[in-house]
Image (tube, rainbow, N blue to C red):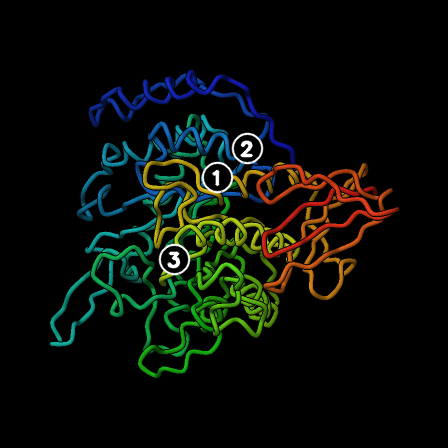
Amino acid sequence: MLFHCRSFIPLPILFFLLVMVIATPHTKAEQEHIVYLPLVQHAVVTPAGSFGVEINPRWMATQSVFARANELGVTWVRLRLRSWQAVQPTRDAEYNWAALLDFERELIGAKIANLTPIVVIQHSPHWATKTYYDADNQPYQTLCGAIRADRFEDFARFMQALVRRYRQPPFDVRYWELGNEPDVDPRLVPIDEVYGCWGDSSDPYYGGEHYGNMLRVVTPAIKAVDPGAQVVMGGLMLDSPNTTTAELGKPENFLEGVLRTGAGDSFDILAYHAYGYYVDRSVDGELTNNKWAESGGGVLGRATFLRAVMARYGVEKPLMLNETGLLFRSGGSFDDYLQAQGDHIVRILARAMAAHIHSIFWYTLNGPGWHSAGLLDDNQVPRPAYFAYQHFIRQTAERGSPVPVTDYGPSIEAYRFIDDVDVIDVLWSREAIPQTVRLPRASVIRMYERDGAVIPPTIVGEQVMLEVGVSPVYVRRVP
């Protein structure tokens, strides 16, 4: 287990340091020769724990979001670099690092808040991307399109320059994610979208081989500059394990296409995305996506699918769930949705950790978020899910992966986090009707509600009676 040393500097002082960096204008020439003073001392570069969030561009430098990120307890943050297009709009142009000033502010903000960044590379210049054709057979290009094979070396040089610049203090970037949801065909989404988009619906492997060939060129270039860099394969949408609509092709074959090229050694971490959909608070949002319900839900089903594909090619890589959330897409009570969101985040974290997922990122911290999924509201005030996440981290950090337990009966889903002193059980009812569980009085140390409030024990003889509903509770017990 890795430990992460935090420097306890008062938050107003930390934010003042960030603002001073942000407020200082730099010309392009000055950008190349900036000398930064160290802001925060870190004992290690590698993050401790499994918990992260994504923060949309420019929000990291907002005081309210910065403060909430600092207080939440996560150790990872996913940030998007937009874009190669801005840095090198023409092939013969020198790199314009001034175009990334906002991004650099976000990196410094992450460093001050003790967050380890994963940087997503998006938006390639038109001179480097494939040409596509619209319904009228007219050519067009898009920033999210696949990079042409004859431009792979250009991309490799750009990534080398990027890594060389941002591996150093005060940025200390070690994790680079190449694309976002690359298993999307750009012809199926608006031009210049936020997706990958390396997908090709006319290809049996959906463009995965093309992406894999890119990795085989670009990853060695990154490692040549920084051998400690970690290359994350662009987080897969993986909408279905078996797409049946002919015109959509087979996007689930994208990873197999990557591995067919021999690119299994050209990435370090395999990322994927999984969202739940709100129906009612009593309904498990993980099981509302019918495409994955039979395999245990979107998080576990996708993990099983991806591991099976890798196993067929003799590849074993850690999985990163770097986008997840509960989306509000239907009617019903928004207040009930907010409570369901808090329940959902605990379920996702416990299940993913038990399945040995490398790390989990909620999308997003800043609010209101995509389909209202933000941990903060539109005034950047914490929602119930924020406190549920915070309490989960406080209860389970440093305990490693939990194990599923059946001590509480078939109607209760439970996970046990163990250390040398005691155990923490996280449990909730699988049924809409609350269930009563009985615990030996001598085994119970303390019980907590989802958001951290202590539950007073109800003692009957030598037993503690606990009512468990759909909202998770914590039981601290003797081993």
State the quadrant of the C terminus: top right
Q: Is residue 299 above or below residue 124?
A: below
The extreme front residue here reads 460
Sequence-wise, the earlier of marks 1 and 2 is 2
Sequence-wise, the earlier of marks 3 and 1 is 1
Instruction: Using the rendered view, name the quadrant where residue 87 is placed.
Output: top left
Q: Pointers 1 and 2 in contact (CB under 8 A)?
A: yes
Residue 45, numbered label: 2
Residue 430 place in picture, x, y as percent: 63, 63
Classify mark 2: helix, strand or loop. loop
The three-letter code of the residue at mark 1 reads: Arg
Residue 425 place in picture, x, y as percent: 72, 48
What residue is shown with label 1? 174
Q: Pointers 3 and 1 in contact (CB under 8 A)?
A: no
> Is residue 234 or residue 435 the one in the foreground?
435
> Is residue 392 or residue 208 the one in the foreground?
392
Residue 251 place in picture, x, y as percent: 40, 72
What residue is shown with label 3? 328
Q: Look at 62% across and 51% down and name the residue there.
A: 472
In this picture, residue 377 sits left or right of residue 317: left
